[in-house]
Image (tube, grey):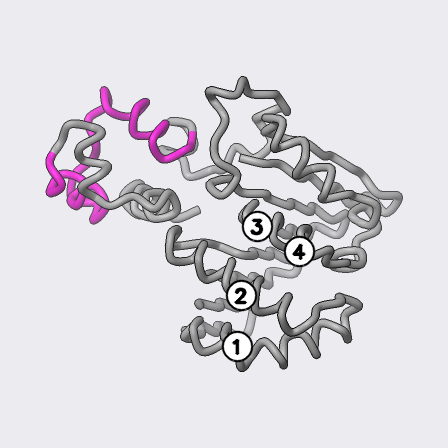
Amino acid sequence: MKIIVKGTDHNIRLGLPTGLLLNRVSAHAISKEAKKYGVTLTYSQTVKLIKAINAYRRAHKEWILAEVSCADGEYVLVKL
Amino acid sequence: MEATLGRRIAILRKEKGLKQEDLANALDVSPQAVSKWENDQTCPDISLLPKLAELLGVSVDELLSGKKEEMAQTAKVLPPEERKDLKDMMLRIVVDSADGDKVRVNLPMALVQVALDMGMEMPQVSGNAALKNIDLGQIVELVRQGAIGNLVEVESADGDIVRIFVE
């Protein structure tokens, strides 16, 4: 996973191992955190989603999940 | 999109899950030629551009300019023989806010389907009122029936423009 955050006074590039972030262990944390944002996700649903994400990732490299360009010049890119 | 033609070819090829050999075979060139394109050492012959763009799922203009023709494709229904498998399709949500912010989210249709099959409930996305009442289940059903292109275009009271298109 690559996360790029560019602003007027900062430029952050993070390379994170996606396998470390999306697995059965992190699924607990993800489902818990999702509730704070009003998204209802059980542990097993989270695992299914993670499997689907990983399957897609393996078949399609360079998947840009999200890209945000703000009017004030901030730019964020999340690539899996 | 990436600044150079070679980089764009590389990224689009990987997004399609193709190897350099696959692209080379389809275009009747050598894998070394494809490698040189992607490293910006050479450019594809002009006669190959239409087929190359088709293989990569973009227009020739988008391939050469790097500017995404997100809004160009109006919604249409493809006949069954031309439809792609759902797992190879992408749902793109594009939000252009009145403040000048631009948000692009790319969700594989396979992932959307998994979430819907689980009965996953989602509140309005990113606080945008325009997305609140959009039924993704109906959009997926439309796509199953062959619909592609710009399926949803909504302007909120705040002036945010939201588009959902499938390719």
Which element type, helix, strand or loop, lies under badge 3?
strand
Residue at the spot 70% in from the left edge and 50% down from the top edge: B100
Q: Does the CB distance between marks 4 and 3 fall below 8 Å?
A: no
Which element type, helix, strand or loop, lies under badge 2?
helix
Label 3: chain? Answer: B
Say whether residue B50 is left or right of residue B138: left
Would you say residue A5 sits in the magenta stretch? no
- Are both tags, 1 and 3, on one chain? no
Say whether residue A50 is left or right of residue B6: right
Residue at mark 3 to residue at mark 2: CA–CA distance = 13 Å
Q: Identify the residue position indicated by label 4 in the image.
A: A71
Residue at mark 2 to residue at mark 1: CA–CA distance = 8 Å
Which comes sooner in the sequence, label 1 or label 4?
1
Residue at the spot 38% in from the left edge and 52% down from the top edge: A59
Q: Which residues are magenta?
A: B30-58
Which comes sooner in the sequence, label 4 or label 2?
2
Q: Does the CB distance between marks 4 and 2 fall below 8 Å?
A: no
Which comes sooner in the sequence, label 2 or label 1?
1
Q: Nearer the viewer, residue B65 or B103?
A: B103
Q: Amino acid at mark 3?
A: Leu
Q: Identify the residue position indicated by label 3 in the image.
A: B107
Q: Residue furthest right?
A: B157
Which element type, helix, strand or loop, lies under badge 1?
helix
Q: Identify the residue position indicated by label 1 in the image.
A: A24
Q: Amino acid at mark 4?
A: Ala
Looking at the image, is mark 3 or mark 2 nearer the viewer? 2
Say whether residue A58 is left or right of residue B83: left
Q: Does the CB distance between marks 1 and 4 fall below 8 Å?
A: no
